[in-house]
Image (spheres, rainbow, N blue to C red):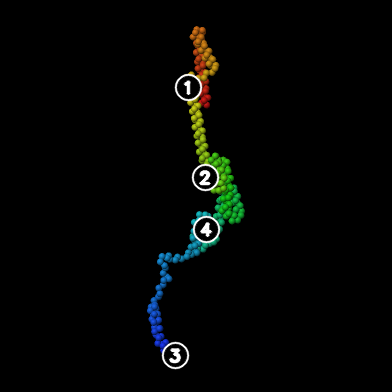
Amino acid sequence: MKLVRVSAILAAVAIAPAVLLPSAAHAAGNAQPAGAAAPDTASEPAAGAEPATAAPTQEEQDRAAVRAILDDAATGRGVREAAEKALAGSAQDVRHFLDVDLERARRDDNQVRATQIMSAGGPAVRKAANEAFNGTYEDVLRFLEVGQFVARAQDDRVQLVQIISAGGPEVKRAGQIAFGSDDPGVLRKFIETGQFEAAAKDAANEAANEAAKAAAEAAKGTAGATAGATAAQDAGTGVHAVTPAAVRTEVNTAADTSELASTGGGDGLGWELGGSATALALGAGLLLAARRRTADER
């Protein structure tokens, strides 16, 4: 038994160099030289990637917020002045404006704006503004956002009725169309521009009617003058002269007298009477024609 154990030990000692030596040689071949470092691939950026930028500081964010407030067209005068003052100061000034001064200045601006609307508005607008001022700050905001427009529509309808009552045909027609609309913008547009456009049409129509009336009167006067001239010409030639009955009787008597004178039944006085009667008849005809011409001219 001891011989077997000794043989096993000798066999293990014999094969140990064959097993250990190749493994050591493989490890030596893969080992890094002394002082050499492995390549650092993590520090190299990927191809095409943008370099990382630093996050903005709190001051930069605050200043950007203030600039956005200044860029808003609805920002009031008080807020603008406070914002510009804060930007000209330190980081603490900017932060204080955003936390405290902004809301205070915005309240003041809204109060001023509501006062201006009340001053320029009609009865309904003034009443709504006074009610808002007697309430809370939220009531003032509600008036600015909604109440002023509702009240203005009421005032516009009252004004629209007044314009229709005093306007001409075109103003009345356009005003009635606007009054029938539920859109407050339609009422406001008629009051601001529509009524003046309609009034201009009424003025143009009235001028055209006056011109047509004057032309008709002129044509009538020309026709009357032409008729009078024709009557005067006819009276002068004796073609259509109208002779009164009394004159015709005298003319006939004169004619009879002339006949007696021509037959010797009278004397020289007959000829004179005949000539006088004829002249009287002609004079009466001319006088009547002149009177008719004067009446036609009138």
Q: In the rendered structure, which amino acid carries the disc numbered 4?
A: Ala
Residue at the extreme bottom of the image, as rendered: 2
Marks 1, 2: nearer the viewer: 1
Q: Which residue is mark 2?
A: 193
- Total labels drawn: 4
User: How far from the left and from the top, in percent, is residue 119?
Assistant: 57, 49
Q: Element type at marker 4?
A: helix
Quick check: 138 left or right of 11?
Answer: right
Residue at image point 47% right, 65% down: 55
Q: Which residue position holds label 3? A: 5
Query: Are the residues tagged 2 and 3 within 8 Å (C-beta)?
Result: no
In the picture of the structure, the residue carrying the numbered disc 4 is 82
Q: Amino acid at mark 2?
A: Thr
Residue under numbered circle 1: 233
Identify the residue at image location x=53%, y=24%: 295
Calculate the distance from the C-alpha at mark 4 to the C-alpha at mark 2: 39 Å
Quadrant of the rendered image containing residue 104: bottom right
Task: Say if 215 sits above or below 121 in the image.
Answer: above
